Structure formats: structure tokens, C-alpha cells
Amino acid sequence: SKKLSINHTKSQPSFSFEFFPPKTAQGVQNLYDRMDRMHDLGPAFIDITWGAGGRHSQLTCEMVDAAQSRYGLETCMHLTCTDMEKEKLDSALELAYKSGCTNILALRGDPPRDKDKWEAKSHEFRYALDLVKYIRKNYADHFDIGVAGYSEGCEDGTEPELLMGHLKQKIDAGGTFIVTQMFYDVDIFLDWVSKCRAHGITVPIIPGIMPISTYASFERRVNWTKCHVPDGWYDKLDPVKNDDAAVRDIGKDLLVEMCKKLLDAGILHLHFYTMNLAQATQRILDDLRLSPEESGTPLEKPLPWRQSLGKN
Ligand code: FAD
């Protein structure tokens, strides 16, 4: 299988795209067309997210299968474990296996919106850690297993030290890479990466990058994740907040600077939360000269998965 083989010696930057299952059949078709076009940008892989509670689980599995077999995209399927029946989880793993997908992002899942108090559906699965163990037990080394990381803390408000310990547990149980929650402050991220390394976490850490498409969505996501916005960003964005085109232009420049800083620090794989849209991500890649037209380098096809995640 084309497993993501982390090459610690290559120094070529690479990137990946995250998509979520659309609500309508038309939306699905549009996304397939977009995935087809975005294939040409040369992502090392794409992610398909898992609807909380297993909503759209069938569609997630179908999209993983289509991405793998129809569009030749190396795919990572997200899977949550605490908020739905075990049968759904088992069948998703089975379908992923049959589609030739070899990468799962193993997650806990969010508590249902209508409940304040967190209640896991089964005692077997309380944390993402349990899913990592379960996949390793049932599928040995077939899957590479990614886990979520939080450079600025998670919603539960867990103490940073404890959160780091839990991250280490997920890696010790078989996690092979980390994808982070979105953030904008590279200094905080780099500091957190150093702390991970000091805790003996040696797997690749992939930064989650959310392009800015409108001021409202930027503000909403920042409030929701409570991530720190670097000095000067609001000074640039606030004056144009009602001008979507200007927000997109300035947002693009800010994100390009952010990505350059990551690449300069040796973080060689960038993961884009595309929100199912191509343009914002493509413009960033163009400016970074990472898209094929800009870099002028012909793409190797089929794309080697995990071609160059770098040593960070
Ligand atoms: P865990 O690692 O299980 O951690 C959850 C909490 O439990 C933390 O506070 C942790 O410190 C604590 N904890 C862990 N282990 C222990 C232990 N042994 N004892 C005590 N406490 C412990 N959600 C979806 O529904 N679908 C998706 O596709 C999806 N994709 C995501 C992708 C990324 C990159 C990220 C960052 C999040 C994603 N989420 C997704 C959201 C995720 O499901 C939620 O953030 C969820 O609340 C936590 O998931 P986790 O895997 O980080 O949980």
C-alpha cells in the first residue's frame, strides 16, 4: 500500500487539503469537481472530515472511496468514537480499508450540542486514545493514525500540561502524526512544538491553517477556538471589514506571511482547512510558489503520500 512514509531527510515543502461532506447531492458533485481540479495543485493528501455523531457517515465513506479510486488522491478519513454506535465506527473502518485508504485521523468527537454534560456513549470509547488503541488492535499497522493537537489549548479548558500528557498517550498508543487545531500565531505554535519535542513526541506535527474568506467567519472562528491573533492583524483587517474582496486580499497576504514563517522554521507540511473552497487556498499556494504553475516543477504522479512531511 502507498502508506505515508515520513521522510525525514527530504526538504521539499508539501501541503494537504481538508474537505467536509456537503449537505446536498449538488454540493457533493460540485465538491468532486473541485477535488478533481485541486488534485492538479499537487496535495500530498486530502482529508475528509467526519460529521459529528456519524451524521453523513455513509457520505464520508463514499467520498473517501471516490477520492482514492476516482481522483487518485491519497486520503485521510477523520473518525470520531465517543458520540455514536460502535457498529458505525466498525463499518467506517472496514469501508476505509476496502477503499485502499490507509490513514485515519482518530478523534474523540464533540459532545452533542443540546447537552452541557459530556457523556460517552460507550465505556469502551471515552477518549480519542481509545480509538487509536482500537484501530491498532484490529488493523495492526495497516493504517497510519493521526491525532488532534492543540497549540493553544482545547475547548475543555484542560490544563496545558495535562493536555500534553494526553497527546503523548495518543502517540505512545500508536499515533503516527499530529494535525493541529487552526491557529494564526506562529510563535505560540513553534513554542508548543518545542514543548512536544521536549515531552518526547517525535512524530510529524502538521499545522492546521484556516484561510480568511470573510471578516465575519474569521471573527467567528477566532472566538470559537480562542486562538491568539498576532499583533497588527486587526489593524489591517478592521478598516476593510465590510469589503469582502479587500478582506480576502489582506487575509491572503497575512496567511502567506504566516506560512512563510512556518516554512522558514522548518515546518515543511501545511494543512489547509479549505472549507470546500479552492480559491483562498490556491492564492496562498500561488504566492508561496508551491502550486505547479508557480514552481514550474512537474508533479510526480501518482503522488507519493507522505512525501515530505519534514522533521517537524
Ligand atoms: P481527546 O484527545 O480524547 O481529548 C479530549 C479531552 O479529553 C481533552 O481535554 C483531553 O485532555 C482529555 N483526555 C484525553 N485523554 C484523557 C485521559 N486519559 N484522562 C482524562 N482526560 C483525558 N470533530 C468531528 O466531529 N469530526 C471531525 O472530522 C473533526 N476533525 C477534527 C480535526 C482536527 C485537526 C481537530 C483539532 C479537531 C477535530 N474535530 C472533529 C473536533 C474534535 O472531535 C473535538 O475537538 C473533540 O472535542 C476533542 O477531540 P480529541 O480527539 O482531541 O479528543
Image (cartoon, grey):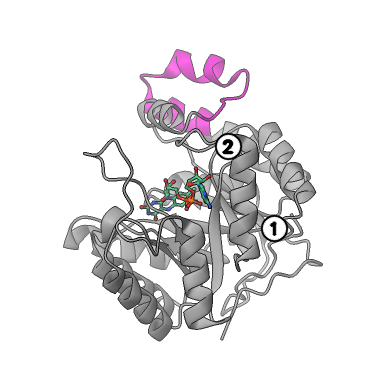
Q: Earlier in the sequence, mark 1 or mark 2?
A: 1
Q: Amino acid at mark 1?
A: Pro
Classify residue 311 as left or right of residue 129: right
Q: Quadrant of residue 268?
A: bottom right
Q: Secondary structure at mark 1?
A: loop
What residue is at 63 percent from the left and 19 percent from the top? 231
Segment tinted magenta in the rendering: 227-251
Name above or below for residue 139 compared with residue 246. below
Residue placed at 59% from the left, 31% from the top? 254
Q: Which mark is residue 21?
A: none
10 Å neighbourhood of mark 1: few (<14), some, or many (≥20)? some
The percent position of residue 36, horizontal first and vertical second, equals: 40, 68
Vertical comparison of 76 with 107: above or below: below
Q: Which residue is mark 1?
A: 13
As drawn, is 125 to the left or to the right of 303?
left
Tell me residue 176's x, y (percent).
63, 66
Q: Main secondary structure of the magenta part?
A: helix
Label 2 sits on a secondary structure element that is: helix
Q: Residue furthest right?
A: 9
Q: Which residue is mark 2?
A: 255
Separation of disc 1 and disc 2 at Cα? 16 Å
Res 290 visible: no
Name the image quarter holding residue 144. bottom right
Q: Is residue 182 left or right of residue 52?
A: right
Q: At 51% from the left edge and 66% from the top edge, which residue is drawn?
A: 132
Number of other residues with Cα within 10 Å of mark 2, as a class: few under 14, some 14 to 19, many 20 or more: many
The correct choice, above or below, for 243 with respect to 4 in the image is above
- Three-letter residue code for mark 2: Leu
